[in-house]
Image (spheres, helix red, strand yellow):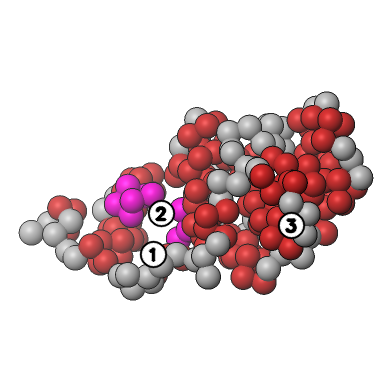
Amino acid sequence: MAADRWTAPCYARPLMMLHNYCYGVVSPHNIRARLFNHLGRQWYLGVLTQPRGYRMSKYANLWQTIGSTLCKYHNVGPYSFEWNEPVSFSIRKKARFLFLLEIALYQHRDTETDIWYKQSPQETLYSFIYSKIGMLPEQFNELSNKAKLLVLQKPLSEFNLPEKARSFLEKLAMPSPADNFDIDPLEGWILGSGWIYLKMS
C-alpha cells in the first residue's frame, strides 16, 4: 500500500513524510503542511520526540498558549509562527515579551507580602512597574503602546528568569527581550492567563 496513504503507526508518520520529501515525493511546501497538520499543531517541536504520555513542561504549555492566542488575534497562520516566517516576526517577539511578563508577574505576586495588588493580574502589573521604576498606574495607562513596551522592557531584561525557562527560550532561538515590535504589546492577551501553567511543579 502506498506510503502516502498514512497506514503506518502514528509515531512513524513524520519520519515517512521526511523520507518522501528527501526522495522528491513531496514538495517543501507539502511536507511542511502535512507535518504541521498531522502533528496536531504542536507548537514546541521538542515535545514530538517524547514518548506517548509525556507531559509538556509548564513553560512549553505557556509558550504554546501564548502563541496560539496571538495567532488567532492577529490573524496569522500558526505554521508561520512555528516555522518563524517573516510574517510572524513581530508575533514571535510579542510572544517572547508576554512569556517573560507572565513569569515575572507570577513570581512578583508570589514573593511580595502586600495583599492589595493580588486581587488581579492587572494590579500585579501595576505593582511590578511601581516596584521597578516608581511609575503609578495612572501614569502607565496614559502611555502609548510603544511607550508601555519600552517601560516594561528594562525590568524584564533585568529579570532573573528561572533556568528552565531560559533554557526553553534558548532552544527556540528567540530574539532578545530588547527587540522592539510595532504591534500593541498587551492587546489580544489576558494578563494572568498563563499562571495556571506556572503553578505546575
Which three-letter amino acid code belongs to the residue tagged 3?
His
Per the image, the residue denoted by label 1 is 48
Q: Choose top left, top right, bottom left or bottom right for residue 158.
A: bottom right
Sequence-wise first label, 3 or 1: 1
Tell me if label 3 and label 1 are in contact, CB under 8 Å.
no
The percent position of residue 34, horizontal first and vertical second, equals 31, 49
Q: How many labels does the image show?
A: 3
Which three-letter amino acid code belongs to the residue tagged 2?
Gln
- Determine which of the numbered discs, if any, sits on residue 108 in the image: 3
Q: Can residue 172 be seen in this view?
A: yes
Tell me if label 1 and label 2 are in contact, CB under 8 Å.
yes
* Viewer-side residue, 104 vs 37: 104
Which three-letter amino acid code belongs to the residue tagged 1?
Leu
Circle 2 sits in a helix, a strand or a loop, which is it? loop
Sequence-wise first label, 2 or 3: 2
Per the image, the residue denoted by label 2 is 42
Q: Is residue 16 visible?
A: no
- Boundaries of the magenta span: 36-45
Which tag is nearer the camera, tag 2 or tag 3? 3
Tell me if label 2 and label 3 are in contact, CB under 8 Å.
no
Q: In which quarter of the image is the N terminus?
A: bottom left
The percent position of residue 169, horizontal first and vertical second, equals 62, 61
Residue at image point 89% right, 40% down: 135
Q: Does the magenta stretch include residue 126?
A: no
